[in-house]
Image: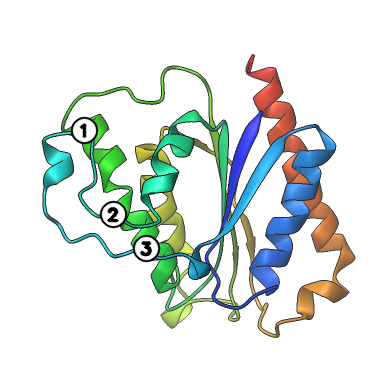
Amino acid sequence: MHVLAFSTSPRYGGNSERLLDSVISGLMLEGVVVEKYRLHEMEITPCKGCGTCDHEFRCSINDDFQRFIEVLISCDGVLFASPLYFMNVPARGKAFIDRCQIFWSAKYQLGLNVFGCRRRLGLLISCGGAKAGPGGAPLFRGIEDTMTFLFDALGLEMMESLLLTDIERKDVISGRPDILEKARERGRMMAIQLAGSGK
């Protein structure tokens, strides 16, 4: 089994990335091969709305996103870890999401089934510094809506998200072995579910 792991934080080794690493360790305990990428270190240009992918399964922008098209098709699962920036994903992560329009267009415009019929899983991992959004709104409503649409475009079944509020300081997760263990167990659960789907 093969899972892609994306960290969207511009801060190396921050809370969301530490959680991601724990989920990865749980997957690897079950023999899953995991490729991890820090999107902030990559050159990913925002979608320019050119409409190329409305007519053919191709993105016209030649940058680091191109390397992910085939592996996003062939992988068995995706981990997406992000801090909350104004209730959503940091800019480089959002650029990556918007470029996944190529997969939305393939599914809903071109009628292509690029992922086949096998079961694939997606997991959102996110930390927010507050306990609630403006006016008491659910803190993760924005990012969960975004990821629901992204995982649908990528042909992924969305697992229950791993979401933590009141996580602000960079090193706060280090002092919470219970949370890190919960993340590791979530990785093991993902691996077990993928194995049980006949992959």
Q: Are marks 2 and 1 in contact (CB under 8 Å)?
A: no
Q: Is residue 21 above or below residue 34?
A: below
Quick check: 26 left or right of 92? right
Query: At numbered mark 3, what does the secondary structure look like: helix, strand or loop?
Result: loop
At mark 2, the secondary structure is: loop
Q: Where is mark 3, residue-wise?
A: 44
Q: Please report the residue visible at 24 percent of the width from the left and 59 percent of the height from the top.
A: 47
Mark earlier in primary sequence (3, 1):
3
Q: How far apart are the alpha carbons under marks 3 and 1?
A: 24 Å
* Left or right of 18, for residue 36: left
> Which image quarter is the N terminus in?
top right
Q: Give the number of the disc on residue 108.
A: 1
Question: Of 43 and 108, which appears nearest the observer?
Answer: 43
Q: Which residue is mark 2?
A: 62
Q: Secondary structure at mark 1?
A: helix
Packing grade of label 3 (10 A; few <14, some 14-19, many >=20) is: many
Task: Please name the residue shown 68% across and 57% down the image.
Answer: 20
Above or below, 122 against 38 in this view is above
Q: Nearer the viewer, mark 2 or mark 3?
A: 2
The quadrant in which residue 75 appears is top right
